Image (cartoon, rainbow, N blue to C red):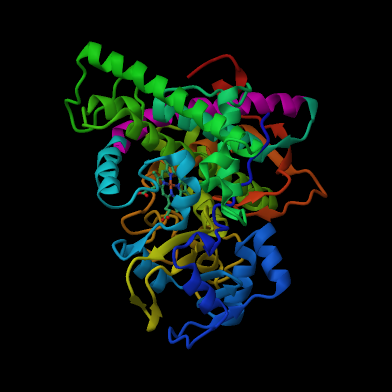
Amino acid sequence: KPEKPTNNTTKQSSWVSPDWLTSLAQSLSIGKDDSNIPIANAKLEDVSELLGGALFLPLFKWMQEYGPIYRLAAGPRNFVVVSDPAIAKHVLRNYGKYAKGLVAEVSEFLFGSGFAIAEGQLWTVRRRAVVPSLHKTYLSVIVDRVFCKCAERLVEKLKTNALNGSAVNMEENFSQLTLDVIGLALFNYNFDSLTTDSPVIDAVYTSLKEAEARSTDLLPYWKINALCKIIPRQIKAEKAVTLIRKTVEELINKCKEIVESEGERINEEEYVNETDPSILRFLLASREEVSSIQLRDDLLSMLVAGHETTGSVLTWTAYLLSKDPSSLSKAQEEVDRVLQGRSPTYEDIKNLKFLTRCINESLRLYPHPPVLLRRAQVADVLPGNYKVNPGQDIMISVYNIHHSPQVWDRAEVFVPERFDLDGPMPNETNTDFRFIPFSGGPRKCIGDQFALLEAIVALAIFVQHMDFELVPDQNISMTTGATIHTENGLYMKVSQRQTKSAFAASSSSSR
Ligand code: HEM
């Protein structure tokens, strides 16, 4: 299997900022800082932690020392770090004043003009074009045709581990599961990464790894085209991106031919094509005026945004449940009662209340990404009378907000019931930005419903068929990236549960 990527897109450095001289001056406290923002003086060991480890952990330490807003002044690096819901709300909602900034710089080689990093009119137009594809009918079809099918295949695979007693890296398996899901849901393409290796899968992981590496490179040499042609890492990355792009372009061309030969057009509000319910098919049938390149980059944006994130949610939820046997039993009892041994339908999801809260609580404790980045476009005053200058890079530490004792009772404890079981799905609006796993404001995640449904279905089918426990004495440490992931994998021993399921009784029977 390809090596698991460790993404570090959060570990940005401000040398790429056009205002880096201002940043340096502020970092060194040259001139009077009238922003009212306390300056955190990072010690040498903290800086090395920032470069090599899990970024959000020192950020949390400094929040305890300097409060909910501070300037991180470490050499030429200068970020305003925000750990307060009201300030986060202000920055995230005022998209006109705060652009995406650094994230775009390190991932442009992969996303191209994709709308996850685009700004201005291009972003507005493309987001408006893509969002309608994720409608309720599409989601209900995908639950059955993609989420359940892929999760059932994972369980089939795990049965071998259950039989021979071998330890299994669940992080790797969840990552493969979510890659298979997103490939099918986006372009009706089966990566089949749960059971096979392929150059395209390798290419996906290589390019994710490259985005991570770029975010921590001290010299952005990859901005110089000539160097990219001779440095082995860049040659490898370019080859990977070329292969992914070519694969997606071929899928687009094939789908375009079919749509055109059938004269297909969207003829109802929640349109789904029976034979190919993918987002690509929807977008082509909508006959939007868009170039194939833009479409390719938009789909790639969604592939990357929707893959590791959901995989990591499943990884950490399984981890939390393995540490809390009473919550695991509760989740299994609920799944057995609601599903009676079958796989879930879209309608079942609302009844898997406790399981859903386990996922919400996992997203609180392990938000992906743990920090959000923005760059001020104009001078602004943040709530609390903190001044920021144009060009200022801002890190909203979702991890800090979600772990702050000022914001949450028993902030460090896994308590799924802290979110009312019969209440609405917790989000940024109904928690007033105390809970922001999908961000908030205009650039909020467009895949939140998709991801929650996918995670609920996968977890339901996993706990329905499997008991699991952590392999003892393994070192499960966190590292940062676009998601929080483990440094060495998450190894578990799995065993098959006795269920009434027709699926469990006959592995070959299909839904
Ligand atoms: C944006 C989280 C799954 C597509 C975002 C953002 C967050 C996020 C926090 C906003 C970043 C920011 O404000 O800078 C997550 C989590 C997921 C998940 C935690 C899984 C549990 C998905 C899925 C898709 C997706 C499955 C696609 C089907 C996107 C896109 C954007 C985005 C396209 C960019 C939106 C824009 O800039 O307008 N996601 N996401 N995400 N997400 Fe997700």
Front in this rendered view, residue 55 or 408: 55
Q: Is residue 80 left or right of residue 186?
A: right
Residue 32, percent from left and from top: 48, 88
Tell me which residue sits at (33%, 75%) in the image. Answer: 380
Residue 95 placement: quadrant: bottom left
Q: Residue furthest front?
A: 226
User: Is there any visible trace of residue 172 in the rendered image?
Assistant: yes
User: Is there any visible trace of residue 329 in the rendered image?
Assistant: no
Residue 194, percent from left and from top: 61, 26
Tell me which residue sits at (45%, 28%) in the image. Answer: 245
Q: Residue furthest top?
A: 261
Residue 459 placement: quadrant: top right
Residue 168 placement: quadrant: top right
Residue 460, percent from left and from top: 53, 38
Q: Residue furthest right?
A: 473
Q: Quadrant of the N terminus?
A: top right
Asked if 206 appears above or below 41 in the picture, the reply is above
Q: Main secondary structure of the magenta part?
A: helix
Tell me which residue sits at (23%, 12%) in the image. Answer: 262
Residue 205 belongs to the span the image colors magenta: no
Front in this rendered view, residue 73 or 432: 73
Asked if 438 appears above or below 22 in the picture, the reply is above
Asked if 384 appears above or below 337 in the picture, the reply is below
Residue 399, percent from left and from top: 54, 63
Residue 158 belongs to the span the image colors magenta: yes
Tell me which residue sits at (49%, 86%) in the image. Answer: 31
Q: How many marks?
A: 0
Residues rendered magenta in the picture: 134-163
